[in-house]
Image (spheres, grey):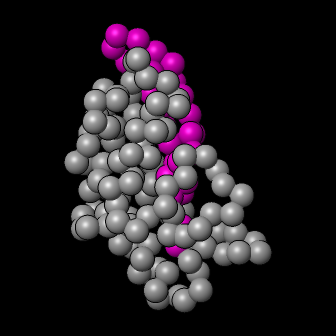
Amino acid sequence: MSNLETIRKAIATTLQSVPNLRVYEYVPDAPQPPCVVIIPETIQYQQIFNGASAYQFILQTMTAAVNNSAGQTELDELIANDGERSIPAAFRARPTLDGSVQLCDLKEMRNYGTIGDAVRYYSAQLIVDVWAE
C-alpha cells in the first residue's frame, strides 16, 4: 500500500537517476540548482478501480539564472523528452516507480521562466500523475 511519503520517496529515487541533479523531497529554504523539488499538488481519493487514489505532483525544476544561455540550456536538457539528463526519460524507464505504484505518468511541462526574489532561478514545472492503492 502506498502513501504520500512512499510515493514521494519513489519519485525521488527515480529523479536520482538523472546525472548532476539535486533532489529535494520537501521544499527547501535555499535550493541549490540544478535541482528538483517534489511538491504534492492534489490527491483524489479512490478515483479508479480497486479503490486506488490519483495523486498529482509538481516537480519544480530549477537551474541557476546567472547566465542566460547556460541556465536555460541546462533547464532545456532536464525537461527534454529524451537524453542523458532528461527527467521525462527517467520516468518512462520506471512507469511503476520500481513497483511502488500502479502507474506513474509525467504528463506535461508548464510555467517555463524565472522564479525567486532575492535569488532568481530558471524554472519549469513538470506535472506527474501517480495512481496507487
x 43%, y 23%: residue: 2
Q: How many marks?
A: 0
Residue 16, horizontal then vertical, whole percent: 38, 54
x 60%, y 73%: residue: 121
From the viewer's perspective, is residue 23 above or below residue 6? below
Which of the 4 image quarters holds residue 88?
A: bottom left
In this view, which residue lies farthest toward the top? Answer: 50
Q: Magenta: predominant secondary structure element?
A: strand
Tell me the quadrant of the picture where the C terminus can be found: top left
x 32%, y 38%: residue: 97
Left or right: 99 as drawn, with respect to 10: left
In this view, which residue lies farthest toward the right? Answer: 118
From the viewer's perspective, is residue 131 above or below residue 10? above
Residue 113 visible to the viewer:
no
Left or right: 119 as drawn, with respect to 9: right
Residue 104, horizontal then vertical, whole percent: 34, 37
Residue 5 visible to the viewer:
yes
Left or right: 77 as drawn, with respect to 69: left
* Residue 127 painted magenta: no
Nearer to me, 24 or 50: 24
Residue 98, horizontal then vertical, whole percent: 28, 36
* Residue 41 painted magenta: yes
Tell me the quadrant of the picture where the N terminus can be found: top left
From the viewer's perspective, is residue 88 above or below residue 6? below
What residue range appears in magenta?
A: 36-63
Left or right: 114 as drawn, with respect to 23: right
x 46%, y 39%: residue: 9
Which of the 4 image quarters holds residue 86?
A: bottom left
Residue 92, horizontal then vertical, whole percent: 25, 48
